[in-house]
Amino acid sequence: MSKKKPLRSAAWFGTADKNGFMYRSWMKNQGIPDHEFDGRPIIGICNTWSELTPCNAHFRKIAEHVKKGILEAGGYPVEFPVFSNGESNLRPTAMLTRNLASMDVEEAIRGNPMDGVVLLTGCDKTTPALLMGAASCDVPAIVVTGGPMLNGKHKGKDIGAGTIVWQMHEELKAGKIDLNEFLSAESGMSRSAGTCNTMGTASTMACMAEALGTSLPHNAAIPAVDSRRYVLAHLSGMRIVDMVKEDLTLSKILTKEAFENAIKVNAAIGGSTNAVIHLKAIAGRIGVDLELEDWNRIGRGMPTIVDLQPSGRFLMEEFYYSGGLPAVLRRMGEHNLLPHPQALTANGQSIWENCQSSPIYNDEVIRQIDNPLSKDGGMCILHGNLAPKGAVLKPSAASAELMKHRGRAVVFEDLDDYKARIVDPDLDVDETCILVLKNAGPKGYPGMAEVGNMGLPPKLLEKGITDMLRISDARMSGTAYGSVVLHVAPEARAGGPLAAVQNGDFIELDAYAGKLHLDVSDEELQQRLANLPAPPTPNFIGGYRELYVKHVLQADEGCDFDFLVGCRGSEVPRHSH
Ligand code: FES
Ligand code: MG
């Protein structure tokens, strides 16, 4: 007979001695009867609930349903809070604290009596942060997403969270609408609980969690307020108890094959560029070698078939009603476009077993492979003397005519410089120019803010120009769009060639060939880099931000901290007394 692996929680509650007394006794102040310390699996519910993270503000109710499922399956639920990354409020950017949250999650899991964990994720960074932390422990874990908001409504029309802000702001600057009209969309945009209802980063990462196999099918798309969201929470609570019994740890699910599936799915859904950074960071934690080149190799050529904003027309509600991610997976699999149909998922079945007979209800939202929204939806990974360690462009959000473009650089040294000068009617710029923004990367901002889709000069907007090529070391919101080269690595503040670009230089982009070239000679470029002024002293001393700037890796390495990469396991630490 094979010997069963003892539960971690038994190292706390399973002994009749001083330590067992202490661990049990204090827990009993919550009203837990003796018999519940009988060795049943203890399941953590890692909750990113916060009123400052509006997208996750309904998570206490989700947690209640997870608890019901855990209890029904014979486990014992313990809910705990972790740092909540709220995209809309956190300044200078929620990305600054993604790694902080991941450390919080990792140490909370390892240091506590937990045999498995349910990860309650929603707003953008909460998904990667929780998966990163749990992956570093390699315990059984299942993702339950909070779900997207209902469609925004404004003047009788559907409007998409985030995307409508970028759109209406450009219209405001172009003089097409007035300020009252602009502000009137606020309450209609966010009219229910949930995350952004566009295919922004939250929806993208929810789809990535499902494509990776870390959640039950349909986790990504069920609206936050749909009762089926609570059913899924309940079923996930039931399932994690069995995952503990089966010792189905994250490393059995998060394989290289799973990441390759996710990369292809990202192209199919027209997902956010932020996924490139987050998947790398998650892979790094579980010990899977994922390279920028994998996005080219796996993703390129995959059509975008999900017609959602910002690339397309619809929103997450329609996506769910049309069949959700299982429908997309089925369509991919039927055309041999799902690289690894046998990849294992959280329910113990392969991804193909889960989706092979999933219904597809609407071919306009989940389009046929031969009638895609965009023929090649894979991320363009760019290299060249301007981005020796790579850069990223999302073709489904870009203008076809700018995918190959040579133009004169109009350079902004940082975001303040951009804000001060972009409105200047005398700024020497036309629509063929390339807007270049420096010092918005991981170390430079710090935190690599979502400012890469910088708005166009008002004088060009007034002329009716709606897109220009933009290049930076920043990120872009998943709800945003445009011909935007992002994640240039190394970043300007780390001494990357981006720092050496000058006004009037010519830059060449050939997205099809994966090329980003600054038209100056190697000698000139080296000379300019050697003569760069020392970076300004940051306006903060000490604290988390100092740790961040010292240890953050560049975008091509997922912006994790150098000392956090890797899986450190879930061995029970020594006693506290
Ligand atoms: Fe939280 Fe978009 S701001 S999901
Ligand atoms: Mg976002």
Image (cartoon, rainbow, N blue to C red):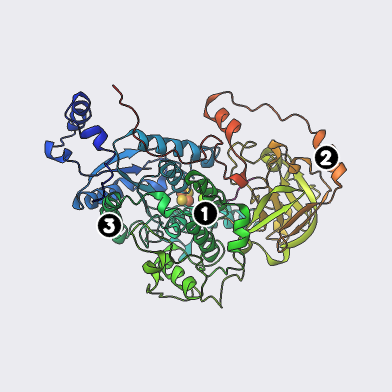
Q: Earlier in the sequence, mark 1 or mark 3?
A: 1
Image point (34%, 59%), residue name: 348
Q: Residue furthest top?
A: 577
The front one of 522 and 199 is 522
Mark 1 vs mark 3, foreground winner is 3
Q: Which residue is mark 1?
A: 162
Could you tell me if the residues under marks 2 and 3 are in contact, i.e. CB atoms within 8 Å? no
Where residue 547 sits: x, y (%)? Answer: 55, 29
- At label 2, which amino acid type do we have? Gln
Q: Is residue 366 visible?
A: no
Image point (27%, 59%), residue name: 231
State the CA–CA distance, disc 2 to disc 3. 58 Å
Could you tell me if the residues under marks 2 and 1 are in contact, i.e. CB atoms within 8 Å? no
From which residue to which does the magenta span run?
474-478
Q: Which residue is mark 2?
A: 526
Tell me the element at label 3.
Answer: helix
Vertical position of residue 467 compared to residue 107: above or below: below
Vertical position of residue 510 compared to residue 416: above or below: below
Q: Earlier in the sequence, mark 2 or mark 3?
A: 3
- At label 3, which amino acid type do we have? Leu
Some atom of ligand 1 lies within 8 Å of the CB belonging to the residue at label 1: yes
Relative side of 161 to 438, left or right? left
Q: Which residue is mark 3?
A: 235
